[in-house]
Image (cartoon, rainbow, N blue to C red):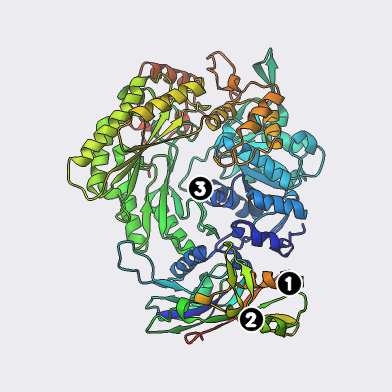
Amino acid sequence: MKPVNLGSIRKLLLKCEKPSRYTGGEFGAPAPVWGDFNFCACFPDLYEVGMSNLGIKIVAKSFADRGMCADFCFAPAKDFADGIKEAGVPLYSLALKAPLADFDMLGFSLQYELCYTNMLYMLDLAGIPLTREERRGKKYPLIVAGGPCAVNPEPLADFVDIFFIGDGESVDADVAGIYTKHGGATREFYKEISALDGVYVPALMTPVHEDGKLVRFDGENKVKKALVSDLDGAIYPDKFAVPNCESVHDRAVIEVMRGCYRGCRFCQAGFIYRPVRKRSVNTLAKQACALIKNTGYGEVSLNSLSTGDYGRLPELISALKKQLPPEVTLALPSLRVDSFEGDFAQDARKTSLTFAPEAGTQRLRDVINKDITEDEILNAAKSAFNAGYSAVKLYFMIGLPTETYADLDGICEICRKIQVLYSSEKRKKALRISVSSATFVPKPFTPFQWEKQATEEEVKEKQDYLLKHLPRGVKLSWSAYYPSFLEAALARGDRRLGKVILSAYKNGCIFDGWDNFFNADGWKKAFDDCGICGVEYVRERSTDELLPWDFIDVFVDKKFLAAERGRAYEAKVTGSCLDGCKGCGMQKVCPAARGEYDSL
Amino acid sequence: MIAFKYTKTDGAEFISHLDLLRHIDRTLRRAGIEVEYSQGFHKHPRIFMGNPLALGVRSVSEYCTVDTRFDGNFKEAFNACAPGGVRCLDFKVTADNPNFAESIKACRYEAEGIKDFDVDEILSKESIIITDMRGRTVDIRPRICSVERRDGKLVFTLYCGEKNLRPDLFCEYLSSLYGGEAAYILKTDSFGGTVF
């Protein structure tokens, strides 16, 4: 391995935006040593986004703890990418400045569908052929991918050698060990790893289509997700690299729980991260103190899908307040409205509070199993206002199954009631309400995985309706339709979409998740050139149809999902696992199913 | 209060001024050096930086003041926890804020890579009009203190503060006139009543 000499691109660093994204040397960054097996965690988005991601830190640590080299790489912005291309410098890793092509394994973290082209962009900048086919039989790094999007790996199956499904604490590094044992990516290597939980090798499985319909999966067609049952004892970094330029979540993070009890029917994370596993107050306090000491951050974020459901939250908060330096603040994202209490809110900078009712009426909230009531929302808002907050952000979805205009009226009504509530007492500041309406995207492994996505006309009409009917003074923001459509197509895509993704990349589509870079024409042309109808992918799927991700087992029963869908149509709430087991299919591995809600 | 002199080299020259302030705040917290906070509505740590250094210019002569009652070896404690390229060189305990942003009047830099030229010719000019980064035309001659050549290196001193001139801008001007390119600009000294 011959590292890239930064001196050779000094001029580029001087003229590109935020050069400290590309220089490494962060305080607390692991100091990898090039060795027998070299892994690079690749995040297909900018440094500021990737440096905030916890998953890649955990995965990298699992390699480092086994004495392997683990470095990082992020997608460079276009100005820097053009510069290194022109200078003939390949994309390199952050700490060692090692060309990506020299690593044994490049691990891509797939956090959202709209980063798929960026994976190709990074491979291309590294001088690595994009498809498995082009790389076959040649000496290139293993291209692997994991993260939430990997639960439907098929759209990327043309590009990725190995997918990791589920928790990444151990299986990724296990595979590295087996690779070393076999002396490379031999047939025996693939055979051995494909038997592991959490490993999917696309080369060993062929989806068979007849008359344009998926009919069966040939080959190795059973893949179970990897599951870490003891989260409390699972590896966790005790230090974070402190980013050189401000990143989106520039703070220490502890992962309080993984998984969510609630089972909101649109929420993929709520199903694929099941069962709920927790860390103990003791472990969390220890981790938070170590991180603050080693990073110097002034804030700790208590992360999980629903931190308010952590039974010992008051204990945890008081332990943290006692043990952390006094100026360190706590951030509690993902608090549900029904678990919001005024005194949980931090005293500093009281401004805005975000609620996500998702739907405007009780009926529609029942449909999506978001079992919070309007009273709970209003009560939470009231305690927030009394605690000094003067701004509220409300998140809703447009295009949910069974939605009617009455549900949109409901959104307007909630805003009106919040306004009345606010003005019922004399307050110093004017109230600000902003409503954000996202387009519903049906996702695999949810009860809504069969649903269609609303059409552009429907969404547009509903947005216009909201614009017209929201009370004065409420700010409405909405997402553009086409990116949501693309997200839906890719999320429920199959292997045939690989060529569309490749073609879109060749049409110049990168950073699709960024409004200012989104290139709708490039994508539309890609679908057309490949003769693939994008709309076909966002249609309603029939329940007897084989779904492209059906060979993956995330331990949630497909029958359970179908039953949940049925209950959605009857507007029946299933509720949280905390009120008793709902029998989703993972009773064998779920602590809550055994009644252990508070085991830690 | 503690005033300290530090470096910004080895990659740290690409860290922006605002990010550097955050880094210093975090370095102090990691080092266990407790900083006083302002008493206003938006509390912030009382860290006072010198003038911002142009991105990409290295320096062994940066100054900063921290309001703290820390009485240990500041240099050792700071350096044990600082990011790469940021190194405390010296420090002193002071009763008053030296206000480096105001009190440093000029800085000396060195650069390599610009083609040889007659330094006296530059200094004999009465005015030098250039277009700055915001497209304004400015006379930079009054902002130039001295230009000389030492051991094959170009050494020049520019004013700071009101009459501030960015060293990279100055080098660009010289390159446009004489050819070559300033590859490594380094701030070597600061001048003003408060430096040490």
Q: What residue is drawn where x is 36% and y is 57%?
A: A329
Residue A234 got which mark?
A: 3
Q: Secondary structure at mark 3?
A: loop
**Residue B114 placed where, x, y %?**
74, 74
Badge 2 and badge 1 in a common chain: yes
Residue nearest the viewer, comparing A493 with A190: A493
Front-most of A359 and B51? Answer: B51
How far across and down, in percent of the image, does residue A547 sit?
A: 58, 20
Residue type at mark 1 is Leu
Label 2: which secondary element:
loop
Residue B126 tag number: 2
Identified at 57% across, 30% down, the residue is A486
- Quarter of the image for residue A469 reads top left
| Disc assigned to residue B177 | 1
Question: Are labels 3 and 1 on one chain?
Answer: no
Question: In whole angstroms, how far apart are the C-alphas of marks 3 and 1?
Answer: 62 Å
> Which residue is most to the front?
B126
Q: Between label 3 and label 2, give the one nearer the viewer.
A: 2
